[in-house]
Amino acid sequence: MNSISSSLLKNISSRTASRPIVASTSALSANVSRVGAVRASLMHQRGYTSSATPKKGSSGRLAFLTLATLGGIGGYYYTSAQAIKTKTIPVTTTKKDIDYERIYKEIAEMLDENPDYDDGSYGPVLVRLAWHASGTYDKETKTGGSNGATMRFEPESAHAANNGLAIARDLLEKIHQKYPEISYGDLWTLAGVCAIQELGGPTIPWRPGRQDAFEAKSCTPDGRLPDATKKEDHIRDIFYRMGFNDQEIVALTGAHALGRCHPERSGFDGPWQEAPTIFSNEYFKAISGRKWIKKTLPHGGWQWVDENNTDVMMLPAEISMYNDKEFKKYFDLYAKDEQKFFEDFTAAFVKLLELGVPFKGDEKVYRFKATTA
Ligand code: HEM
């Protein structure tokens, strides 16, 4: 058991001794131990009900239709993955006197500030922002990645893959106004680290060093992030381009323990398991332990849903990955061994957030203490 998880559990167990664990109809109800206890506490804190339906979300149908009409969503429907060469333009320099510990705490305090948002935490959307800012990296041209924070500009902010991420950028803008010295790339990646740790995940070492770009022409081309409607060979193409191997790809995908799909953002609908505000290996247990059936979506696409709890879903790309022999062995490994998942996720996530960042080499590496620990 990871040390953060274990102290979180200790802390939480004493506060929730007589509180029943809210369980769903699925296999999850059989799950005891750390996740159950952590979940019981965090659900309570966030007023989570075990329903996979977000408190606000159905209002998105109209917005979805509008966006779809404007021409861009329904899964990650990307245009061609053209390889336009872009360069980030470093303008700011890393300052040594920025209080990153303070900024971490401010982000942590913000995560639960709106109990009506989704499942009660902004954490998942902040993790997605950190990943989409970083996952544009191309190791051949050495373009993209979290350096530059080019998603501040159009066209990158308007790429279909980034639908919904304005919510995360706007939240962090409030913090940037208080601490304008931090670069956006550092702030966004720090927020991803903070969200994972605060939601019960492992300690993720993080260091500053990203420099803001100030021109839209630094944006990366559309098509660099994965298309959830495609198969495992596409997922390999996308992540190999960043420099990841099969094991790292599966470990990273375990971040889908957090959050949910939103019809008005991606066209898909629902969380990957019943506790979407707890970082755990439940995603792997779900994909490997349940029976998945196809469900047609209102806009004509489809997704997989759990036969016993059709609110829970998997993306077409994920089941294709699970059916691939090389990928499958890691899904099964992480379903059995959460500690191994935490270790491998930490290494791969640090690598992701640092792709293409021009570190000087003398940056301090921070290991923030979770405020929930
Ligand atoms: C296998 C490749 C991947 C595909 C095809 C994929 C696809 C998606 C899709 C379609 C959504 C739903 C967006 C929405 O409707 O709001 C989503 C959400 C999310 N993704 Fe991924 N993703 C992938 C990899 C990753 C990785 C590597 C991470 C992080 C390390 C990640 C973290 C997240 C998180 C936390 C959410 C939930 C966001 C929220 O609740 O607002 N994903 N992903």
Image (cartoon, rainbow, N blue to C red):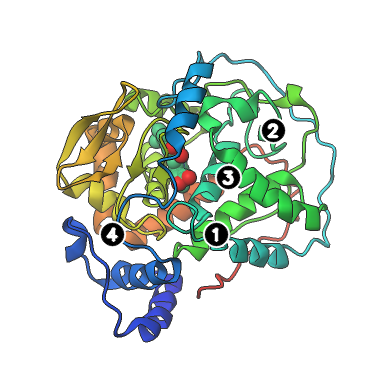
* Residue pointed to by mark 1: 114
Alpha-carbon span between mark 3 and mark 4: 25 Å
Q: Nearer the viewer, mark 1 or mark 3?
A: 1
Alpha-carbon span between mark 2 and mark 4: 37 Å
Q: Position of residue 360 (x, y in %)?
A: 76, 47
The amino acid marked with disc number 3 is: Ala
Which is nearer the N-term, disc 1 or disc 3?
Answer: 1
Residue at point 82%, 53% (across, down): 181
Task: Decide: is 92 above or below 175.
Answer: above
Q: On the rendered structure, is 55 left or right of 99?
A: left
Q: Position of residue 280 (x, y in %)?
A: 36, 59
* Residue pointed to by mark 2: 150
Tag 4–tag 1 contact (CB < 8 Å): no
Indicate if the residue with disc 3 has its beta carbon within 8 Å of ligand 1: yes
Label 2 Cα crowd, 10 Å radius (few <14 / some 14-19 / many 20+): many
The amino acid marked with disc number 1 is: Asn
* Residue pointed to by mark 3: 130
Tag 2–tag 3 contact (CB < 8 Å): no
Alpha-carbon span between mark 2 and mark 1: 27 Å
Indicate if the residue with disc 2 has its beta carbon within 8 Å of ligand 1: no
Residue at point 72%, 36% (across, down): 148
Alpha-carbon span between mark 4 and mark 1: 33 Å
* Residue pointed to by mark 4: 337
Return the residue nearer the eye: 326 or 179: 179
Residue 40 shows up from this direction: yes
